[in-house]
Image (cartoon, helix red, strand yellow):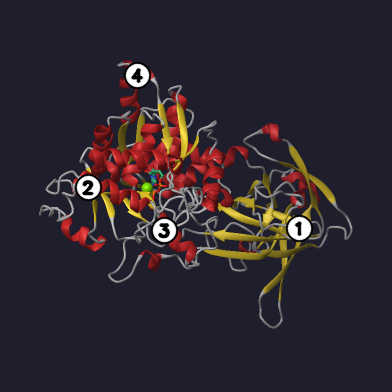
Amino acid sequence: MTSSESKRYSDFIRDIITGDLVAGKNNSRVHTRFPPEPNGYLHIGHAKSICLNFGIAAEFGGLCNLRFDDTNPVKEEVEYVESIIEDVRWLGFDWGDRLCYASDYFEQMYQYAVELIKMGKAYICDLSADEIREYRGTLIEPGKESPYRNRSVEVNLDLFSRMRTGEFPDGSRTLRAKIDMSSGNINMRDPVIYRILHARHHRTGNTWCVYPMYDFAHCISDSVERITHSICTLEFEDHRPLYDWFLYQLNIYHPQQIEFARLNLSYTVLSKRKLVELVEGGYVIGWDDPRMPTIAGLRRRGFTTESVVNFCERIGVAKRDSIVDIALLEHCLREDLNKRAPRIMAVLRPLRVVIVNYPEDKTEELDAINNPEDQGMGTRKVPFSRVLYIERDDFREDPPKEFFRLAPGREVRLRYAYYIRCAEVIKDNKTGEIIELRCTYDPQTRGGDSSDRRKVKATLHWVSAKHAIEAEVRLYDHLFLKADPNEVEESKDFKSNINPKSMGALNSCRVEPSLANAKPDSRYQFERLGYFCVDPDSSKNKLVFNRTVTLRDTWAKIEKKQKIGS
Ligand code: ATP
Ligand code: MG
């Protein structure tokens, strides 16, 4: 699908919802939710879920809640809550006044648990976590019933209320659902519903020392919020019978859980546990490290909201796991930046060029086009003078056959300026390094065109030495060496696949003076080099850029090949 096609997506989830609307189910309401656990920053996989949940609500005239699934106080933090709110907003979605927290329903959940006990559907178990695991059985062996399974309702109620008041230490008891220890689905073998945890919660403080487990909290939160379609990832397929069991036993409003395949992306990891490891272990600079697949990282790297949302729409929704090529994400980004990013000239590895026949103190203001894709973006003036910088890579003393750029005796075009010819190469006496080129220019070629239509084979970008601004440019590559970072030798883990050259910095780059007041978050195409954005580390005294993405579009090539092949 291309971005120009109409914005009506079709997939199995939208088909289910359309069917429900036709049948008049839920009084024809559509109400979804995005339920992150605030135990890390959001990543591009979450963006897929956000676009799906908020997108469906918008398409069907429904609502979508942002709900924090904050049931594990040990791993959750306010910093994460705030970052999640910021990131969902950045993606362009709005939850109105429906910012919800599972912790708001703790009392309600507790009362539902009491009801289950009263119905004889839940009991207090004194087995330790290890014992519970032992008793649980395996995929091929049934589990064993807990010796505490047949406690009376009275005893269970008494113990549960004493658990709540803090009488017992962590891990000494749990509340478990009484379902079926021989069920083929291990999730149904008397799962734990509540555990004792004397831990301060970022919202409820010390009110609670028992906390509900995910499976119990999630279906109740969905029910309380009257969610119609509870969309989650495939790993919860085996939990659906439990989701349904709780709501059925409690006889309360019953949303429909629907699972889809999570996003996996090549050359990165999309598991919060692993991302936390990278941050806490100092393998990256932070959650917003521009190499991270987090929304904060992508934003700092220079991604636009539109490119991320467009990517999420293009990959679509399916029921089978797969790995999406990161080149597609980069392709969506280039496509968007191509339309909106102004072109400028910058030199990353400067080589000094002196135009020997150009007057010492003359400066000319030459016209340059801001974006050939969009005439409306206008033109600007670029100063030209006797001493310039060009890219070191654009000159070869001994040019190989396919090298058409500058070389001794050869003539090239300087973009928007003049034709120049290399007359002399100046080297450092000691090191032999090339430190300067002496060139002549042809005054008849102003603007970059020769009146006699003589051909040159290359057009180079350049900056005027005395006008250019010094800048630091940070370059990035994939964070991992392997397309699947989880593919590791025995005894090693995914971190052994980290790309040691995933970040580099160039400190004496030069950019044209029109960028003097460039603000953090602005994005540019540096002609011939790629797309770059201003990093928040940038200050009045020092401009810092991130390379967002190069110009080479490997995805476009893949698509072309596929077309030829098909
Ligand atoms: P972990 O990475 O530790 O498994 P999580 O990704 O499940 O955690 P949550 O905060 O529970 O973290 O996720 C919030 C929502 O985002 C869930 O509905 C989850 O299914 C969805 N989600 C998480 N990862 C992906 C992914 N890679 N692709 C699509 N949806 C995802
Ligand atoms: Mg989860």
Calculate the distance from the C-alpha at mark 3 to the C-alpha at mark 4.
45 Å
For label 4, count other residues whose C-alpha is less than 10 Å away and answer few (under 14), some (14-19) or many (20+). some
The numbered mark, 2 or 1, whose residue comes first in the sequence reads 2
Calculate the distance from the C-alpha at mark 2 to the C-alpha at mark 4.
31 Å
Mark 1 or mark 4, whichever is nearer to me: 4
Q: Which residue is mark 1?
A: 469
The numbered mark, 3 or 1, whose residue comes first in the sequence reads 3
Any mark on residue 198, and which?
3
Q: Which residue is mark 4?
A: 21
Mark 3 or mark 1, whichever is nearer to me: 3
Residue 328 in view (yes/no): no
Residue 236 in view (yes/no): yes
Q: For the residues labelled 3 and 4, say whether their Cβ atoms are less than 8 Å apart.
A: no
Q: Is the residue indicated by label 1 positioned so its CB lies within 8 Å of ligand 1?
A: no
The numbered mark, 3 or 2, whose residue comes first in the sequence reads 2
Mark 3 or mark 2, whichever is nearer to me: 3
Mark 3 or mark 4, whichever is nearer to me: 3
For label 2, count other residues whose C-alpha is less than 10 Å away and answer few (under 14), some (14-19) or many (20+). some
Q: Give the image location of residue 120, x and y in percent.
A: 20, 41
Q: Where is 564 relative to 422, above or below?
A: above
Q: Give the image location of residue 312, x and y in percent.
A: 44, 39
Q: At 65% from the left edge and 56% from the top edge, which residue is drawn? A: 545
The numbered mark, 3 or 4, whose residue comes first in the sequence reads 4
Is residue 465 toward the left or the right of residue 288 in the image? right
Any mark on residue 187, and which?
2
